[in-house]
């Protein structure tokens, strides 16, 4: 999620990025019911844990931060 969006300079609150955050939530919902705290914590982990940052940022520097910010914003608005 987010490599092309980060490269294009899209904001976490843009419609396109928020749609990606919703897709991530829907994907997670296959196995669990993510709470607001769960989704926010997951987003933070993508930046706080260098292993996740490395994985996301292989799609372009700043992708992990964009994903984190988008998930937090989506959770705040929708959960």
Image: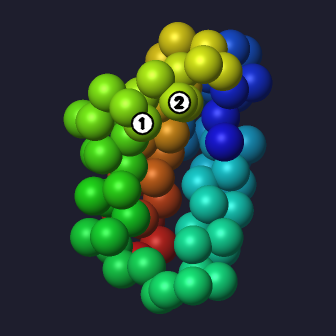
Q: Quick check: can you spot residue 68?
A: yes
27 or 8: which is nearer to us?
27
Instruction: Say which quadrant the C terminus sits in.
Output: bottom left
- Residue 37: percent from the left, percent from the top? 26, 70
Q: Secondary structure at mark 2?
A: helix
- Look at 36% across and 56% down and name the residue there: 42
Between the residue at mark 1 and the residue at mark 2, the CA separation in whole angstroms equals 5 Å
- Identified at 68% across, 14% down, the residue is 7
Helix, strand or loop at disc 1?
A: helix
Tell me where residue 64 appears, x and y as whole percent. Answer: 46, 30
Q: Image point 75% across, 24% down: which residue?
A: 4
The residue carrying pointer 2 sits among few (fewer than 14), some (14 to 19) or many (20 or more) residues within 10 Å by Cα, namely few
Residue under numbered circle 2: 55
Which residue bears the numbered disc 1? 52
Q: Is residue 32 above or below residue 37?
A: below
Report whether 32 appears left or right of 4. Answer: left
Residue ranking furthest to the front: 51
Q: Residue placed at 47% from the left, 87% from the top?
A: 33
Q: How is the image coloured?
A: rainbow
Q: Is residue 36 left or right of residue 8?
A: left
Q: Position of residue 16 (x, y in %)?
A: 73, 43
Q: Nearer the viewer, residue 75 or 28?
A: 28
Choose between 76 and 59: the one closer to the eye. Answer: 59
Give coordinates of residue 71: x percent, y percent: 46, 52
Is any part of residue 66 visible from this angle? no
């Amino acid at each position: 999620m987010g490599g092309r969006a980060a490269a294009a300079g899209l904001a976490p609150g843009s419609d396109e990025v928020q749609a990606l955050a919703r897709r991530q939530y829907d994907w997670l919902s296959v196995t669990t019911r993510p709470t607001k705290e769960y989704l926010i914590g997951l987003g933070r982990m993508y930046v706080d844990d260098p292993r996740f940052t490395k994985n996301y940022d292989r799609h372009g520097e700043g992708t992990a931060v964009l994903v984190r910010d988008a998930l937090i914003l989506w959770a705040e608005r929708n959960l």
